[in-house]
Amino acid sequence: MQSGINILSIVPYSILPAQSGGKLTIRELHHYLGKICIDNVAGTTDNEDNTRYSFRLHKILPTSKLRYLPYSGTGKLYTLAKQNNVQYVHTEHHYMGYTAMAVAKKLGVPWFIRSHNIESERFRSIGKLWWPVMRWFEQSMMRKANGIFFITQEDADWAVKNYGIASAKCHVIPHGTPLAAKPAYNLNAKTEIAQALHIPTDVPWLYFLGALDYQPNKEALAHILSDIVPLLNVKGLKYQLLIAGKGLSDELTAQINAAENIHYLGFVPDLDTFLHACDVMLNPVMTGGGIKTKAVEALGYNKMVVSSVAGAAGLIPSACGSNLQIIANYNWDAFANAVINATTSQPSIPDSFYDTYNWGKIAAKVLAIMQSTKA
Protein backbone atom coordinates (compact mmCIF):
# COMPACT_ATOMS: atom_id res chain seq x y z
CA MET A 1 0.00 0.00 0.00
CA GLN A 2 1.37 3.42 -0.95
CA SER A 3 2.05 5.85 1.90
CA GLY A 4 1.35 9.05 -0.06
CA ILE A 5 4.97 10.12 0.30
CA ASN A 6 6.52 11.52 -2.89
CA ILE A 7 10.20 11.12 -3.76
CA LEU A 8 12.33 12.17 -6.73
CA SER A 9 14.87 9.55 -7.78
CA ILE A 10 17.56 10.55 -10.28
CA VAL A 11 18.81 7.60 -12.35
CA PRO A 12 21.37 8.97 -14.84
CA TYR A 13 21.36 6.09 -17.34
CA SER A 14 18.98 3.60 -18.90
CA ILE A 15 17.67 0.83 -16.64
CA LEU A 16 14.87 -0.42 -18.91
CA PRO A 17 15.80 -2.96 -20.00
CA ALA A 18 18.07 -3.96 -17.10
CA GLN A 19 20.87 -6.02 -18.63
CA SER A 20 23.46 -5.86 -15.86
CA GLY A 21 23.49 -6.52 -12.14
CA GLY A 22 23.83 -2.82 -11.32
CA LYS A 23 20.85 -1.84 -13.48
CA LEU A 24 18.81 -4.71 -12.09
CA THR A 25 19.38 -3.59 -8.51
CA ILE A 26 18.26 -0.05 -9.39
CA ARG A 27 15.15 -1.24 -11.18
CA GLU A 28 14.14 -3.60 -8.39
CA LEU A 29 14.68 -1.12 -5.56
CA HIS A 30 12.53 1.47 -7.29
CA HIS A 31 9.90 -1.08 -8.21
CA TYR A 32 9.49 -1.97 -4.54
CA LEU A 33 9.72 1.66 -3.41
CA GLY A 34 6.92 2.42 -5.86
CA LYS A 35 4.72 -0.05 -4.05
CA ILE A 36 4.91 1.92 -0.78
CA CYS A 37 5.35 5.52 -1.97
CA ILE A 38 5.11 7.60 -5.13
CA ASP A 39 8.55 7.18 -6.64
CA ASN A 40 9.18 9.62 -9.51
CA VAL A 41 12.19 8.22 -11.35
CA ALA A 42 13.87 10.82 -13.55
CA GLY A 43 15.62 8.75 -16.20
CA THR A 44 17.30 9.13 -19.56
CA THR A 45 15.40 9.32 -22.81
CA ASP A 46 16.74 5.97 -24.04
CA ASN A 47 14.79 3.98 -21.44
CA GLU A 48 12.06 1.71 -22.71
CA ASP A 49 8.55 2.67 -21.64
CA ASN A 50 7.64 1.51 -18.15
CA THR A 51 4.69 -0.84 -18.41
CA ARG A 52 5.60 -3.39 -15.71
CA TYR A 53 7.05 -1.60 -12.71
CA SER A 54 5.44 0.45 -9.97
CA PHE A 55 7.63 3.56 -10.15
CA ARG A 56 6.70 6.52 -12.35
CA LEU A 57 9.32 6.90 -15.10
CA HIS A 58 9.96 10.41 -16.43
CA LYS A 59 12.30 10.28 -19.43
CA ILE A 60 13.70 13.80 -19.13
CA LEU A 61 17.48 13.36 -18.87
CA PRO A 62 19.56 13.47 -22.06
CA THR A 63 21.89 10.65 -23.06
CA SER A 64 24.75 13.07 -23.68
CA LYS A 65 27.61 12.98 -21.18
CA LEU A 66 26.87 16.66 -20.58
CA ARG A 67 24.16 15.52 -18.17
CA TYR A 68 26.93 14.85 -15.63
CA LEU A 69 28.05 18.46 -15.55
CA PRO A 70 27.42 20.14 -12.17
CA TYR A 71 23.83 21.42 -11.89
CA SER A 72 22.88 20.04 -15.33
CA GLY A 73 19.12 19.54 -15.64
CA THR A 74 18.34 21.34 -12.38
CA GLY A 75 15.47 23.31 -13.89
CA LYS A 76 13.65 20.32 -15.37
CA LEU A 77 14.12 18.25 -12.25
CA TYR A 78 12.96 21.04 -9.95
CA THR A 79 9.82 21.51 -12.05
CA LEU A 80 9.10 17.78 -11.93
CA ALA A 81 9.67 17.69 -8.17
CA LYS A 82 7.50 20.75 -7.53
CA GLN A 83 4.65 19.40 -9.64
CA ASN A 84 4.71 16.16 -7.67
CA ASN A 85 5.10 17.64 -4.17
CA VAL A 86 8.38 15.81 -3.63
CA GLN A 87 9.54 15.45 -0.02
CA TYR A 88 12.84 13.64 -0.61
CA VAL A 89 15.44 13.65 -3.40
CA HIS A 90 17.53 10.57 -4.11
CA THR A 91 20.23 9.99 -6.73
CA GLU A 92 21.76 6.72 -7.84
CA HIS A 93 25.53 7.18 -7.57
CA HIS A 94 27.12 10.53 -6.74
CA TYR A 95 27.63 11.63 -10.35
CA MET A 96 24.67 14.00 -10.36
CA GLY A 97 25.19 15.03 -6.76
CA TYR A 98 25.38 18.76 -7.45
CA THR A 99 22.12 18.61 -9.38
CA ALA A 100 20.35 16.58 -6.67
CA MET A 101 21.66 18.94 -4.00
CA ALA A 102 20.49 22.03 -5.89
CA VAL A 103 16.97 20.63 -6.43
CA ALA A 104 16.69 19.57 -2.78
CA LYS A 105 17.92 22.95 -1.55
CA LYS A 106 15.30 24.80 -3.63
CA LEU A 107 12.62 22.48 -2.27
CA GLY A 108 13.94 22.61 1.31
CA VAL A 109 14.04 18.81 1.58
CA PRO A 110 16.73 16.20 2.40
CA TRP A 111 18.70 14.52 -0.35
CA PHE A 112 20.39 11.13 -0.50
CA ILE A 113 23.03 9.29 -2.50
CA ARG A 114 22.85 5.57 -3.17
CA SER A 115 26.46 4.40 -3.42
CA HIS A 116 26.83 1.14 -5.33
CA ASN A 117 30.47 0.88 -4.27
CA ILE A 118 33.36 3.15 -3.35
CA GLU A 119 33.82 4.28 -6.92
CA SER A 120 37.28 5.77 -6.46
CA GLU A 121 38.54 2.49 -5.01
CA ARG A 122 36.95 0.53 -7.84
CA PHE A 123 38.66 2.82 -10.34
CA ARG A 124 41.97 2.41 -8.54
CA SER A 125 41.64 -1.39 -8.43
CA ILE A 126 41.08 -1.65 -12.18
CA GLY A 127 43.89 0.77 -13.05
CA LYS A 128 42.13 4.00 -13.98
CA LEU A 129 44.75 6.74 -13.64
CA TRP A 130 42.31 9.49 -12.68
CA TRP A 131 40.95 7.74 -9.61
CA PRO A 132 42.24 10.57 -7.30
CA VAL A 133 39.88 13.01 -9.05
CA MET A 134 37.01 10.58 -8.51
CA ARG A 135 38.03 10.27 -4.87
CA TRP A 136 37.82 14.05 -4.33
CA PHE A 137 34.43 14.32 -6.08
CA GLU A 138 32.92 11.28 -4.35
CA GLN A 139 34.06 12.44 -0.92
CA SER A 140 32.69 15.93 -1.52
CA MET A 141 29.25 14.69 -2.56
CA MET A 142 28.99 12.26 0.34
CA ARG A 143 29.89 14.96 2.83
CA LYS A 144 27.21 17.27 1.43
CA ALA A 145 24.39 14.70 1.26
CA ASN A 146 21.93 14.29 4.13
CA GLY A 147 22.31 10.53 3.93
CA ILE A 148 24.13 7.84 1.97
CA PHE A 149 22.78 4.37 1.23
CA PHE A 150 25.69 1.92 0.96
CA ILE A 151 25.26 -1.58 -0.42
CA THR A 152 27.77 -3.09 2.01
CA GLN A 153 28.82 -2.46 5.60
CA GLU A 154 32.44 -2.55 4.43
CA ASP A 155 31.82 0.42 2.12
CA ALA A 156 30.05 2.37 4.87
CA ASP A 157 32.92 1.76 7.29
CA TRP A 158 35.44 2.73 4.60
CA ALA A 159 33.66 6.02 3.93
CA VAL A 160 33.56 6.87 7.63
CA LYS A 161 37.27 6.14 8.03
CA ASN A 162 38.67 7.54 4.78
CA TYR A 163 36.18 10.21 3.70
CA GLY A 164 35.31 11.47 7.17
CA ILE A 165 31.58 10.88 6.67
CA ALA A 166 29.50 11.03 9.85
CA SER A 167 28.48 7.50 10.73
CA ALA A 168 24.91 8.66 11.46
CA LYS A 169 24.55 9.53 7.75
CA CYS A 170 25.66 6.07 6.59
CA HIS A 171 23.01 3.39 6.04
CA VAL A 172 23.46 -0.14 4.67
CA ILE A 173 20.90 -1.05 2.02
CA PRO A 174 21.99 -4.27 0.26
CA HIS A 175 21.10 -5.69 -3.10
CA GLY A 176 18.07 -7.91 -2.66
CA THR A 177 15.86 -10.63 -4.01
CA PRO A 178 12.15 -10.52 -4.82
CA LEU A 179 11.84 -13.88 -3.09
CA ALA A 180 10.37 -13.74 0.41
CA ALA A 181 11.01 -17.42 1.16
CA LYS A 182 12.84 -20.42 -0.24
CA PRO A 183 11.28 -21.21 -3.63
CA ALA A 184 9.82 -24.59 -4.46
CA TYR A 185 12.10 -26.58 -6.74
CA ASN A 186 11.16 -26.42 -10.43
CA LEU A 187 11.53 -30.00 -11.67
CA ASN A 188 11.12 -29.01 -15.31
CA ALA A 189 13.82 -26.32 -15.41
CA LYS A 190 16.83 -28.61 -15.81
CA THR A 191 15.05 -30.77 -18.37
CA GLU A 192 14.10 -27.73 -20.43
CA ILE A 193 17.66 -26.39 -20.61
CA ALA A 194 19.18 -29.86 -21.04
CA GLN A 195 17.05 -30.48 -24.10
CA ALA A 196 18.01 -27.13 -25.59
CA LEU A 197 21.74 -27.64 -25.02
CA HIS A 198 21.80 -31.45 -25.46
CA ILE A 199 23.57 -32.01 -22.14
CA PRO A 200 23.07 -34.63 -19.40
CA THR A 201 21.06 -34.00 -16.25
CA ASP A 202 22.64 -36.74 -14.10
CA VAL A 203 25.71 -34.65 -13.18
CA PRO A 204 25.90 -31.37 -11.22
CA TRP A 205 25.57 -28.14 -13.15
CA LEU A 206 28.04 -25.43 -12.21
CA TYR A 207 27.55 -21.90 -13.48
CA PHE A 208 28.91 -18.39 -13.78
CA LEU A 209 26.61 -15.47 -14.58
CA GLY A 210 27.42 -11.83 -15.23
CA ALA A 211 28.16 -9.13 -17.81
CA LEU A 212 31.27 -10.56 -19.46
CA ASP A 213 32.41 -7.26 -20.95
CA TYR A 214 32.87 -5.98 -17.36
CA GLN A 215 36.54 -6.47 -16.50
CA PRO A 216 36.11 -8.04 -13.01
CA ASN A 217 33.70 -10.63 -14.47
CA LYS A 218 35.96 -11.24 -17.47
CA GLU A 219 38.87 -11.89 -15.10
CA ALA A 220 36.75 -14.18 -12.92
CA LEU A 221 35.72 -16.27 -15.91
CA ALA A 222 39.35 -16.49 -17.02
CA HIS A 223 40.20 -17.89 -13.57
CA ILE A 224 37.39 -20.44 -13.89
CA LEU A 225 38.58 -21.65 -17.28
CA SER A 226 42.33 -21.55 -16.66
CA ASP A 227 42.70 -22.24 -12.93
CA ILE A 228 39.60 -24.00 -11.60
CA VAL A 229 38.36 -26.19 -14.47
CA PRO A 230 41.73 -28.00 -14.90
CA LEU A 231 41.73 -28.86 -11.18
CA LEU A 232 38.15 -30.11 -11.28
CA ASN A 233 39.09 -32.33 -14.21
CA VAL A 234 42.20 -33.70 -12.49
CA LYS A 235 40.19 -34.40 -9.35
CA GLY A 236 37.70 -36.44 -11.39
CA LEU A 237 34.51 -34.38 -10.98
CA LYS A 238 31.88 -35.08 -13.63
CA TYR A 239 29.94 -31.87 -14.29
CA GLN A 240 28.50 -29.43 -16.79
CA LEU A 241 29.53 -25.77 -16.65
CA LEU A 242 27.13 -23.10 -17.94
CA ILE A 243 28.35 -19.57 -18.68
CA ALA A 244 25.72 -16.83 -19.08
CA GLY A 245 26.05 -13.13 -19.82
CA LYS A 246 26.66 -10.78 -22.72
CA GLY A 247 30.01 -9.64 -24.07
CA LEU A 248 32.17 -12.79 -24.11
CA SER A 249 35.61 -12.15 -25.65
CA ASP A 250 36.96 -14.14 -28.60
CA GLU A 251 39.76 -15.53 -26.43
CA LEU A 252 37.41 -16.93 -23.80
CA THR A 253 35.01 -18.13 -26.50
CA ALA A 254 37.81 -20.25 -27.94
CA GLN A 255 38.53 -21.80 -24.52
CA ILE A 256 34.88 -22.65 -24.01
CA ASN A 257 34.48 -24.12 -27.49
CA ALA A 258 37.44 -26.41 -26.87
CA ALA A 259 35.69 -28.10 -23.92
CA GLU A 260 32.82 -30.55 -24.35
CA ASN A 261 31.23 -29.90 -20.98
CA ILE A 262 31.36 -26.06 -20.96
CA HIS A 263 28.56 -24.10 -22.63
CA TYR A 264 28.09 -20.39 -23.35
CA LEU A 265 24.45 -19.31 -23.31
CA GLY A 266 24.88 -15.58 -23.96
CA PHE A 267 22.40 -13.20 -22.33
CA VAL A 268 19.72 -15.22 -20.51
CA PRO A 269 16.36 -13.40 -20.38
CA ASP A 270 14.67 -16.06 -18.20
CA LEU A 271 16.84 -16.20 -15.08
CA ASP A 272 14.15 -18.00 -13.11
CA THR A 273 14.45 -21.14 -15.21
CA PHE A 274 18.23 -20.86 -15.40
CA LEU A 275 18.71 -20.49 -11.64
CA HIS A 276 16.30 -23.31 -10.83
CA ALA A 277 18.22 -25.59 -13.18
CA CYS A 278 21.76 -24.94 -11.93
CA ASP A 279 23.32 -26.33 -8.75
CA VAL A 280 26.50 -24.48 -7.76
CA MET A 281 27.55 -20.90 -8.51
CA LEU A 282 31.27 -20.20 -8.98
CA ASN A 283 32.22 -16.70 -7.85
CA PRO A 284 36.02 -16.20 -8.08
CA VAL A 285 35.72 -12.42 -8.48
CA MET A 286 38.89 -10.61 -7.38
CA THR A 287 38.41 -6.95 -8.34
CA GLY A 288 35.64 -4.38 -8.41
CA GLY A 289 33.60 -3.01 -5.53
CA GLY A 290 30.22 -3.44 -3.94
CA ILE A 291 28.19 -6.58 -3.41
CA LYS A 292 28.10 -9.24 -6.12
CA THR A 293 24.45 -9.13 -7.12
CA LYS A 294 24.48 -12.54 -8.75
CA ALA A 295 25.57 -14.16 -5.49
CA VAL A 296 22.49 -12.75 -3.75
CA GLU A 297 20.28 -14.09 -6.55
CA ALA A 298 21.88 -17.53 -6.29
CA LEU A 299 21.45 -17.68 -2.52
CA GLY A 300 17.85 -16.53 -2.84
CA TYR A 301 17.23 -19.56 -5.07
CA ASN A 302 18.81 -21.77 -2.37
CA LYS A 303 21.88 -22.55 -4.46
CA MET A 304 25.34 -23.37 -3.18
CA VAL A 305 27.81 -20.53 -3.80
CA VAL A 306 31.57 -21.03 -3.74
CA SER A 307 33.25 -17.65 -3.60
CA SER A 308 36.59 -15.97 -3.16
CA VAL A 309 36.91 -13.62 -0.19
CA ALA A 310 36.80 -10.67 -2.60
CA GLY A 311 33.72 -12.04 -4.34
CA ALA A 312 31.87 -12.41 -1.04
CA ALA A 313 32.54 -8.82 0.04
CA GLY A 314 29.37 -7.31 1.46
CA LEU A 315 27.53 -10.57 2.02
CA ILE A 316 26.53 -11.39 5.59
CA PRO A 317 27.75 -14.97 6.14
CA SER A 318 25.51 -15.54 9.15
CA ALA A 319 22.44 -14.85 7.00
CA CYS A 320 23.66 -17.17 4.24
CA GLY A 321 24.40 -20.25 6.35
CA SER A 322 26.31 -23.14 4.81
CA ASN A 323 25.08 -22.23 1.30
CA LEU A 324 27.97 -19.75 1.10
CA GLN A 325 31.47 -21.20 1.06
CA ILE A 326 34.21 -18.55 1.16
CA ILE A 327 37.72 -19.47 0.02
CA ALA A 328 40.92 -17.45 0.32
CA ASN A 329 41.70 -15.39 -2.78
CA TYR A 330 43.72 -17.26 -5.43
CA ASN A 331 43.72 -20.57 -3.50
CA TRP A 332 42.47 -22.51 -6.51
CA ASP A 333 43.04 -25.98 -5.07
CA ALA A 334 40.88 -25.15 -2.05
CA PHE A 335 38.33 -23.52 -4.36
CA ALA A 336 38.09 -26.66 -6.50
CA ASN A 337 37.73 -28.86 -3.41
CA ALA A 338 34.93 -26.62 -2.13
CA VAL A 339 33.13 -26.88 -5.47
CA ILE A 340 33.34 -30.68 -5.34
CA ASN A 341 31.99 -30.70 -1.78
CA ALA A 342 29.20 -28.31 -2.77
CA THR A 343 27.99 -30.67 -5.48
CA THR A 344 27.21 -33.29 -2.84
CA SER A 345 25.81 -30.90 -0.20
CA GLN A 346 22.12 -30.41 0.44
CA PRO A 347 21.49 -26.65 0.22
CA SER A 348 19.38 -25.12 2.97
CA ILE A 349 19.34 -21.33 3.03
CA PRO A 350 18.19 -20.02 6.45
CA ASP A 351 15.02 -17.95 6.81
CA SER A 352 17.16 -15.07 8.11
CA PHE A 353 18.47 -14.61 4.56
CA TYR A 354 15.06 -13.40 3.37
CA ASP A 355 14.62 -11.17 6.43
CA THR A 356 17.81 -9.40 5.35
CA TYR A 357 17.65 -9.49 1.56
CA ASN A 358 13.99 -9.40 0.52
CA TRP A 359 13.39 -6.32 -1.65
CA GLY A 360 10.12 -5.39 0.05
CA LYS A 361 11.82 -5.18 3.44
CA ILE A 362 14.76 -3.29 1.96
CA ALA A 363 12.48 -0.68 0.35
CA ALA A 364 10.58 -0.19 3.62
CA LYS A 365 13.90 0.45 5.38
CA VAL A 366 14.90 3.05 2.78
CA LEU A 367 11.64 4.94 3.17
CA ALA A 368 11.86 4.84 6.96
CA ILE A 369 15.37 6.31 6.84
CA MET A 370 14.20 9.10 4.54
CA GLN A 371 11.32 9.93 6.85
CA SER A 372 13.66 10.14 9.85
CA THR A 373 16.09 12.53 8.13
CA LYS A 374 15.79 16.31 8.17
CA ALA A 375 17.24 18.70 5.59
Image (cartoon, rainbow, N blue to C red):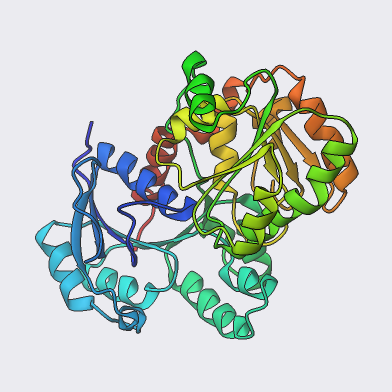
Q: Would you place residue 191 above or below residue 320 in this image?
A: above
Look at the image and tell me whether residue 92 can be seen: yes
Residue at the limit of the structure toward the left, as seen here: 83
Left or right: 309 as drawn, with respect to 207: right
Q: Would you place residue 113 above or below residue 291 in this image?
A: below
**Residue occupying the point 49% across, 70% down:** 142
**Residue occupying the point 52% across, 74% down:** 138
Q: Would you place residue 133 above or below residue 268 in this image?
A: below
What is the tally of numbered marks visible in this picture? 0
Look at the image and tell me whether residue 184 can be seen: no
Left or right: 276 as drawn, with respect to 261: left
**Residue occupying the point 82% across, 33% down:** 338
Picture coordinates of residue 23 (x, y %)? 41, 54
- Which quarter of the figure has residue 263? top right
Q: Nearer the viewer, residue 333 or 101?
A: 333
Q: Nearer the viewer, residue 72 or 60?
A: 60
Q: Nearer the viewer, residue 102 or 264?
A: 264
- Which quarter of the figure has residue 374? bottom left
- Quadrant of the snapshot with the C terminus: bottom left
- Which quarter of the figure has residue 155? bottom right
Picture coordinates of residue 20 (x, y %)? 46, 53
**Residue occupying the point 69% across, 60% down:** 219
- Quadrant of the snapshot with the N terminus: top left
Left or right: 94 as drawn, with respect to 308: left
Picture coordinates of residue 225 (x, y %)? 74, 50
